[in-house]
Image (spheres, helix red, strand yellow):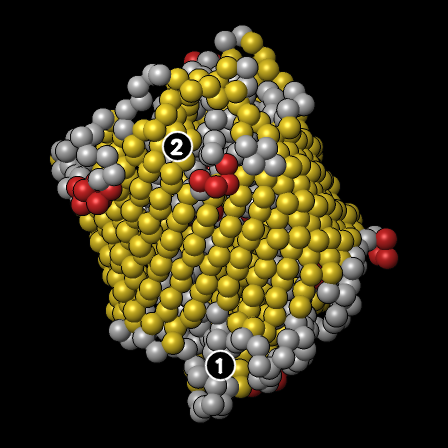
Amino acid sequence: MRTALGVFLAALSAPALAIEIDGRIDEPEWQRAQRVTDFRLTEPLSREPLPLPTEVLILATEEGLAIGFRNSQPASVQRNRQRGQRDQAGAVDRVNLYVDFDGDGRTGYNFTVSLANSINDTTITNENQFNDDWDGSWRHATSEDDGAWYVEMLVPWHIAPMREAQGGNRTMRVGLDRVIAQTGQRGSWPAVGFTEPRFLTQLQPVTVPAFSQSLLAITPYVSGIYAGGELDERGSDFDAGADVFWKPHGRFQLSATLNPDFGQVESDELVVNFSATETFFSDKRPFFTENQGFFDVPFGSLNQRSRLLYTRRVSGDVTAALKLNGSVAGFNYGAFAADEEDGREFYALRGTRDFEGGDAGSHGFGAMATRVEYPSGVRTADVYEADHRWSNERWNVRSTVVGSDVEQSGVNRRDSGAQVLIDYDMQNTWRQQLYALHVGKDFALNDFGYLERNNFNYLRYDLGHRVTDLPESSAYTGFDWHYAASHRSNDQGERIAWAASVNRQGNRRDGGNDFFDIAMWSAGQDDLITRGNGIVEVPAKLYAYYERFRPRKGAWQLYGYGRYAGEGLEGPEQGALTLNIEPTYFVNDELSFTATLELSYSPDWLLWREDNQLATYRSNLAYLAAGATWLIDPRQELRVRLEAIGLDAEALQSWRVIDRKAVASDEVVPDFSVRNLGFQVRYRYELAPLSYLYVAYVRGGSLYQEGRDNPFGVDDEFRQAFDLRDSEQLLVKLSYRFEI
């Protein structure tokens, strides 16, 4: 599986593509293709043969990498033809192509096509972290008959930067898989699952002729907004700008944007956040997602949010931005620069180099520097990073060292951080992971990056166990168990908590899944909640969570979860309870309605008020999201989405932090309420690949209010949220991609 195929998939003199991408795989050129038939189950991860025969053809052409899937599926196995928006295909029959064009395990690309010809495309970094913010320009088509269904893909060579080929050939890493919607089974070649610690570096090496393409793409846009909300400046506003993408050859790419659009075409979900940690939002702006995976260096947590470069920091009125990606003499490099109208400037440089070590494993080195300059020199923030990775058949080790240097008002503050992640595959059903993190007290990353917190030391050990030999009578096809223990402290030696958890992911025979997690934290200290005004001792904490997803059966799909979080001053006995249910009704394969209802009750909600003052509340929260998606035809879609939040909190007790203790205070703390509303109707017409006409009506608002005569009026707050009209806009945007 890990040895190179060493097969040329097309002759060096192959003519321009004579394959029509129509989903039929009937052209004679396919006779020269490499055939793959050994698909093994990776969901569940038993690596047994996939029950339904699957054949894939791989053919390198001057036009791009051509892939043809033949998926046998008799009438006894139901086919799911549900259509989906881009990057939202759902639990449907689908196939995936994974490609690492350089074969070094740094950056991969995932191309997904469903039976209904809906698509997903994502970037893959750090072995198995997928990001669907990126949208690429590639071709695809499907067809079907009584015994099978078929997919053709064409991925152009200009879709990604690639290192210089050796000897006229290019060795890529390729992965293929197929998902059967009725059972939820996934068959892969090679037999590696994307949830495993090593994914990209275990894809199959494939040698092809080294083709190269040049491309100049210019995407100008014009937009008009009419604003009429209560807090908006009423009137009309028109804007224009452009994105430029230039790839003269495979070893260099340039992306640039002039006056990028920040209209509300893609809206963020509503969030109520009173914690000391900021909310993370993804970025769908085309310039900021193109070739961004090269700069995606994780640091600061095991989740996929903390990173050195968080493009949502560039959030003002951007005058221009530039990005370079390329390779030279075995080194990969990237540069990023952006200038905001208010005077802030952002810069980033990154370089990497990889070495194959044979049986000793492979090594990769990287370095990155970022800088943010504020107007009038009031503040400059520099971050410097170096990373290393090493892997072989069993081990995968990734380490990162980071330093920050911030100058503000003539004062410099410097600090550092480091992390190491060690995965060990015991090559049976067990695996182990160790993660260690240190972040200094004065380490500053959030001028350009995203870090949940500094002044932090974290050590976590995880033991994973896979179970796939379940009887046919079981409702499940496999389990993935994890047992973890961790310790948290800060640099002053304060023990934040010890913690232990057990969780299990279950794959069900109905094509769905479920998940539960139980975690217990010891008593410890909370050094964040007062925002620097003292550390407070807190009791033990208890968390319990369960979720269930049942895919579409007939007209209905269902998802829901329940959560219990005992984390207040009263301990595990007075925890917050949250229930969520999300049904989806499918009128047909093109029209669906979704509703989400979430209710939360907390008898012991602990919040910061000011200085060293805390308060506990009894709170109720109601959240409603409702929407409809109508995929009118392959080019047109209409989406309606409504979100409303009503929260009512009754003050129970005021506290002052004295000598690390929360001491009851006689101070009066007011009740408070929150209302939020977000509503959008959006029509989109695809004029050509990555060229769109948008017409959107957007309305929203929020209200925080203290002191109410009717505590526990969450139903009243929820109803009144629909009256909010802080912002109301009608947006029209036209963008068209010209390829030269």
Q: Can the viewer see residue 682 in this picture?
A: no
N-term-proximal mark, 2 vs 1: 1
Return the x and y of residue 251 as percentages of the image width and height. Answer: 62, 50
Return the x and y of residue 249 as percentages of the image width and height. Answer: 58, 53
Side of 298 where 605 appears, left or right: left
The quadrant of the rendering that contains the C terminus is: bottom left
Element carrying mark 1: strand
Q: Residue at x 57, y 47 (%)?
A: 519
Q: Residue at x 44, y 17 (%)?
A: 656
Which is nearer the eye, 338 or 16?
338
Q: Residue at x 47, y 90 (%)?
A: 76
Return the x and y of residue 677 as percentages of the image width and height. Answer: 24, 43
Q: Is residue 384 above or below residue 504?
A: above
Return the x and y of residue 366 as percentages of the image width and height. Answer: 69, 39
Name the mark nearer the viewer: 2 or 1: 2
Image disc number at residue 150: 1
Badge 2 amino acid: Phe
Q: Residues within 10 Å of mark 1 (few under 14, many from 20)?
A: many
Q: Is residue 211 above or below residue 576?
A: below
